[in-house]
Image: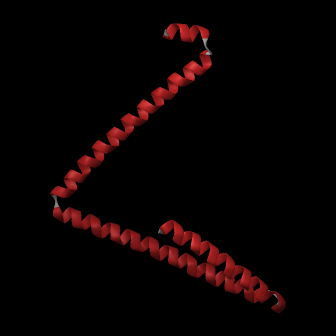
Amino acid sequence: MAIERLLTGNLGSQVKELMATEDILLEAVRDLVKDEIKSYIRQKVDADEELKEELKEAISYYFNAKARSVYAELKASRAAARLGLRILPDELQGEVGEALVGLFEKELGNLLEKAL
């Protein structure tokens, strides 16, 4: 049956189908290996309370640092926007300022939506 399909069908599509199956198997094996490694690491961490607390603290510091970095970028963006407005002629400042506020509101809304 398989030989008939190879002989009568499109050989290229048959080979692609076979390769796709092989890719799926490789991906599944990778996932199984990852799961085993995660399980092993989790076992080691759970066995050592001091290590577990140290990891929790490190992760907390990491996320706080990331949050501070994002906050710093927001402050820098705000300062750059204010400087840009100051450079503009007086008659354009209001219009451009409103456009910037609208843009920031939209972007902030999108960011909060993704975060929540």
Check the image and name the residue furthest to the front. Answer: 1
The x, y position of residue 68, in whole percent, is 46, 76
Q: Residue at x 31, y 44 (%)?
A: 35
Q: Nearer the viewer, residue 8 or 26?
A: 8
**Count of all numbered marks drawn on residues in the image:** 0
Q: Residue at x 70, y 80 (%)?
A: 100
Instruction: State which quadrant residue 97 falls in.
Output: bottom right
In the displayed structure, does residue 97 sit left or right of residue 116?
right
The x, y position of residue 4, in whole percent, is 54, 7
Q: How was the colour assigned to the protein in this rendering? A: secondary structure
- In the depicted structure, whether residue 26 falls above or below residue 105: above
- In the depicted structure, whether residue 112 falls above or below residue 23: below
Q: Residue at x 22, y 63 (%)?
A: 52
Q: Residue at x 49, y 74 (%)?
A: 69
Instruction: State which quadrant residue 33 falls in.
Output: top left
- In the depicted structure, whether residue 14 falls above or below residue 39: above
- In the depicted structure, whether residue 45 falls above or below residue 111: above
The x, y position of residue 62, in whole percent, is 38, 68
Q: Nearer the viewer, residue 5 or 79?
A: 5
The x, y position of residue 107, in whole percent, is 61, 72
Instruction: State which quadrant residue 104 falls in.
Output: bottom right
Q: Nearer the viewer, residue 33 or 7?
A: 7
